[in-house]
Image: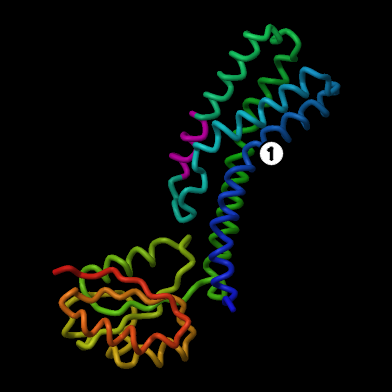
Amino acid sequence: MKSSAERYTTFLPTLLSVTQWLIAPVLSVGSFLIILYYSNIALEEHYLAMAVIVFLLSLIILKETDLFESAASADAQAQGSNLLIYWGVMIFALVVIGYLTGSTDLFEVNVLYLWAVITPVLILVANYIFRFLLLLSLKSEENQRKVVIVGANDESCKLANNIASNIAYGLRLTGYFDDRSEERTGVSMGVPYLGVMDKLQDYVKQNGIDLIYITLPVSKQQRVLDLLDKLHDTTASIYFTPDIF
């Protein structure tokens, strides 16, 4: 049976994908309909047709903005600029369609201007709220998978830093194992030293570790095989990021 953290982190990419796919079209059409309602404009056929076209164009064009590409990113200005560029492309596409179909005179220009200005702001605000709630949830220990690293070297340091700097991974690095003492490794992992590798099996079982990253040099192939043999009765997933030097 999967742990709650494993189920959560398996479901999360799907949630992100669906949200990214639908939030722009839903807000684009929703804001359009709301503005029509408060402007006392009936939802006639040409407005309904525009709503359908807006939804389809949003699915095709705005999905390229990748607003949720990195839930840990703090580059709000870049994200806003990215959205405005694609929003401009979509507005241009709507204008071209309007001229080609000869339907531009059917619409209230002031209503369309208001919609074109308000909607990207709504999309950005919704994105920031979603990202805030997502990060808040990912910071909760119960929603994180526990990770240990086997081996202390430059490769494992990069891995530890990568995990620590990307909350969106939903991972919590509890420490590392190495047969050398913390003083002898010559590297700073930034996480607790948990002991020699012979203690790995018991620690994994007692602490509910979900993921094990092995970063031992390829020259220690037999040591790796011995570890795998000891870990065969655990439920942890094992990944290799070998130090080839």
Residue 147's place in the image compared with 133, above or below, is: below
Q: Position of residue 69 (x, y in %)?
A: 47, 48
Answer with left or right where residue 52 lies relative to residue 175: right
In depth, the one of 166 and 125 nearer the eye is: 166
Quarter occupied by the C terminus: bottom left
Is 71 one of the magenta-colored residues? no
Residue 19's place in the image compared with 164, above or below, is: above
Magenta segment boundaries in residue numbering:
76-85
Which residue is found at the position 38% from the left and 86% from the top?
231
Is 84 one of the magenta-colored residues? yes
Which residue is found at the position 47% from the left and 91% from the top?
206
Q: Mark 1 sits on what residue?
A: 26
Number of labels in the image equals: 1
The amino acid type found where label 1 is placed reads: Val
In depth, the one of 51 and 132 nearer the eye is: 51
Q: Position of residue 242 (x, y in %)?
A: 24, 70
Callout 1: helix, strand or loop? helix
Answer with left or right where residue 68 lies relative to residue 199: right
Which residue is found at the position 55% from the left and 64% from the top?
10
Residue 65's place in the image compared with 182, above or below, is: above
Q: Position of residue 107 (x, y in %)?
A: 74, 14
Answer with left or right where residue 185 lies relative to residue 125: left
Q: Position of residue 190 (x, y in %)?
A: 31, 74
